[in-house]
Image (cartoon, helix red, strand yellow):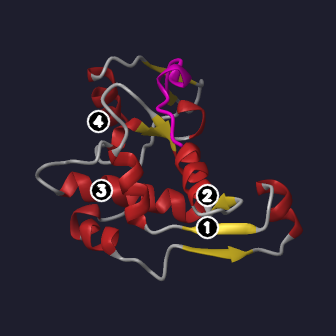
């Protein structure tokens, strides 16, 4: 996110924006891609609450959080665009608080990939994950991407 130091992410985190709400999508491609027509729009605090529940040494992914929230609200899926934005907001909001009480670095992208949009980028997330005992590896030749090795073994089960 550009100009992170000039934004109040904690204010953004508290904005409810008429959420949570489930809306019906009608686009056949979207229904086929996500397996249903009931799409949840969850507020940023919902993502933050799930991220706070991930204990030391354990991990989750944005997709796991999205699926968990969809189940909790009897929806078929959660909007992936707002999910990515709201997960980033939760990370930056925690970073701006002195207590840094949301362990955002434990939330990975699909396939166990690290999130370059978190505070400090890949190097900071990598250091925090390695401090909890995870092994971070790179993949790619021209554009390196970073992943937690065998991240599936450390996934925290979300109901």
Asked whether residue 156 is drawn in magenta, I would say yes
Residue pictured at 62% horizontal, 54% vertical: 71
Q: Nearer the viewer, residue 59 or 95?
A: 59
Q: Residue furthest right?
A: 28
Q: Give the labeled residue for mark 1.
A: 40
Q: Disc 4 or 3, which lies upstream in sequence?
A: 3
Q: Nearer the viewer, residue 83 or 69?
A: 69
Which of the numbered marks, if any, corresponds to residue 92? 3
The answer to whether residue 62 shows anywhere in this view is yes
Q: Disc 1 or 3, which lies upstream in sequence?
A: 1
Verify CB contact (< 8 Å) between mark 3 and mark 2. Answer: no
Q: Disc 2 or 1, which lies upstream in sequence?
A: 1
Circle 2 residues within 10 Å: few <14, some 14–19, many ≥20: many
Distance CA(mark 4)–CA(mark 3)? 13 Å
Q: Position of residue 58 (x, y in %)?
A: 40, 28
Verify CB contact (< 8 Å) between mark 2 and mark 1. Answer: yes
Q: Position of residue 43 (x, y in %)?
A: 45, 69
Q: Give the labeled residue for mark 4.
A: 124
- Camera-near label (3 vs 2) is 2
Distance CA(mark 2)–CA(mark 1)? 6 Å
Q: Is residue 56 above or below residue 16?
A: above
Distance CA(mark 2)–CA(mark 4)? 30 Å
Q: Secondary structure at mark 4?
A: helix
- In the image: residue 59, left or right of residue 120: right
Distance CA(mark 1)–CA(mark 3)? 23 Å
Q: Give the labeled residue for mark 2.
A: 70
Q: Quadrant of residue 90?
A: bottom left
Q: Secondary structure at mark 3?
A: helix
Residue range in magenta is 147-159
């Amino acid at each position: 996110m550009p100009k992170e130091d000039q934004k109040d992410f904690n204010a953004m985190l508290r904005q409810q924006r008429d959420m949570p709400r489930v809306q019906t999508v009608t686009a056949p491609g979207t229904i086929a891609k996500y397996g249903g027509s009931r799409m949840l729009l969850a507020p940023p605090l919902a993502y933050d609450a799930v991220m706070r529940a991930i204990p030391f040494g354990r991990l989750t992914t944005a997709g796991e959080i999205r699926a968990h929230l969809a189940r909790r609200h009897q929806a078929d899926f959660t909007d992936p665009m707002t999910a990515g934005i709201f997960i980033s907001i939760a990370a930056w909001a925690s970073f701006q608080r002195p207590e840094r009480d949301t362990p955002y670095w434990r939330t990975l992208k699909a396939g166990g990939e690290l999130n370059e949009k978190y505070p400090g980028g890949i190097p900071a997330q990598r250091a925090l994950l390695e401090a909890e005992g995870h092994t971070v590896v790179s993949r790619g030749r021209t554009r390196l991407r970073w992943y937690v090795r065998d991240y599936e073994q450390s996934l925290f089960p979300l109901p």
